[in-house]
Amino acid sequence: MVRAVGLDIHRDFCEVAIMEAGELRSVGRVDTSPAALELFAGSLAPDDWVAFEVRGNAAEIARIIEPHVARVVVVSPSDTGIRQARAKTDRLDARTLARLLAAGSLDAVWIADERTRVMRRRLARRAQLMGARSRCKNEIHAVLIRRLIPRSQVSDLFGQAGRRWLGELELPLEERESVDAGMRQIEFLERELADVDRLVALDALGWAQAKRLMSVPGVNVICAASFLAAVGDISRFKDPRNLVGYLGLDPKVRQSGPGSGTSGHISKQGSASARWALVEASWSAVRQPGPMRAFYQRVRARRGHQIAIVAAARKLACLFWFLLTREQDYAYAQPSLTKKKLRRLEIAAGAPKYQGRSNIWSTNNAMREAERALAEQAEHAYKNTVRDWQAAQAKKPAVEVGASATKGRASNKPSKGKAARQTTSP
């Protein structure tokens, strides 16, 4: 008989409950330490199932218990209903998990592999360093505003020329202390950022999937790494729609009664850092000639810039799914641009720079211009395809079948609703 074991895990202990042969019982607490967890895991049967909610230490607890049992199920707290319970204690939570596990009512979340976990931590640390650097820069800007100092003529206030200008300013003692302290912190944070970027670049150089995503114009190593760290194994998603929903780029739908539904803002579920990276990459991608820019311009003409850039991010996520599942580089890639990205990635990883070769990219630049011309042709072909497709759809009679956010969606007709739902158009 398979036993269902529920753990309510905390920083210092785990509350344990077991469901066996229809009988539910609490068995006490186990310390959340490697030695205590190893001893507890050894007391379990090889055919036991164990369930607990996602916490900061859930991955390590799962790693210790997995070799001793048949299955470890790590679940999202929002899927258990425990938060909404009228009575909530550690003991009751563990018993609820054991009961739900025995009934087969728990869906396991995906546990990231080691490489993905390492990349997630590095990118999270990088985001923290960038946030701290931005706060220091804002504090220096606040000093200039308080003292009514006009804007500097230098393009980068925190570059070499900008730092010399800041050092020459006549400021009161307390303001000078603030500026000098901020500059010291910025210098320290930039060194730390360079170290993190070097580690990310070293990992990306040996990551074929990251280099494949970088073949898309506008996608740099941070965007590619953020996407892969958030998604992990792409085979978990059977189609692009599932991936878009996982990233929170799908629109919310409201429908009730006989009328058609309405779709609103995106759900914003999943990784916020991955959505941010995709939107940032879309800003660059839509400035490059090619089908992505044509798609953005078509949506912007109907819905405006904000919706169009989010739709472009959604389209970029779908493109990533196809590139990774088919193991193909981007069909409209610009090899000279990709080559330049990879060379900069090598330099960030610590490779020596070319010395005394100022025209090293001269041939590459000539190739780049030719590739841009080809990309413009591809953009023109995309526009023609869309125009022909829209003309063909206009001749078809409208069919309203089913209740959906977009009329005709249930009958696989083309989307006429929100821009973020461009799934049936080219």
Image: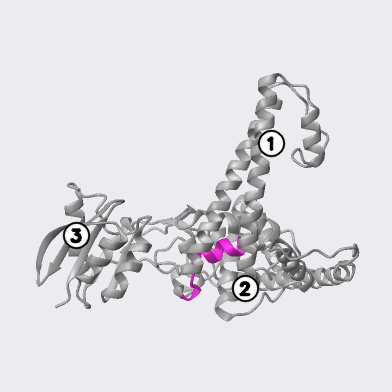
At label 2, which amino acid type do we have?
Gly
Question: Would you name the residue on which mark 2 appears?
Answer: 206
User: Marks 3 and 1, Cα distance to the nearest angstrom?
Assistant: 52 Å
Question: Which label sits on residue 30?
Answer: none
| 226 within the magenta span | yes
- Name the amino acid, label 3: Val
The three-letter amino acid code for the residue at tag 1 is Met
Q: CA distance from mark 1 to mark 2?
A: 35 Å
Query: Is residue 189 among what the camera can see?
Result: yes
Estimate the x, y position of residue 372 in percent, counting from the top left. Answer: 81, 68
Question: In the rendered image, is residue 418 in sight?
Answer: no
Q: Residue, x 60% and y 72% (percent of image)?
A: 207
Residues in magenta, as a range: 223-235
Q: Main secondary structure of the magenta part?
A: helix
Write down the quadrant of residue 176 in the picture. Answer: top right
Say which element carries label 2. Answer: loop
User: How many neighbours does mark 3 have within 10 angstroms: few (below 14), some (14-19), or many (20 or more)?
Assistant: many
The Cα–Cα distance between marks 2 and 3, rounded to whole angstroms, is 42 Å
Residue linked to disc 3: 16
- Callouts 2 and 3 close, C-beta under 8 Å: no
User: Vertical placement of 280 versus 315: above or below?
Assistant: above
Q: Nearer the viewer, residue 285 or 377?
A: 285
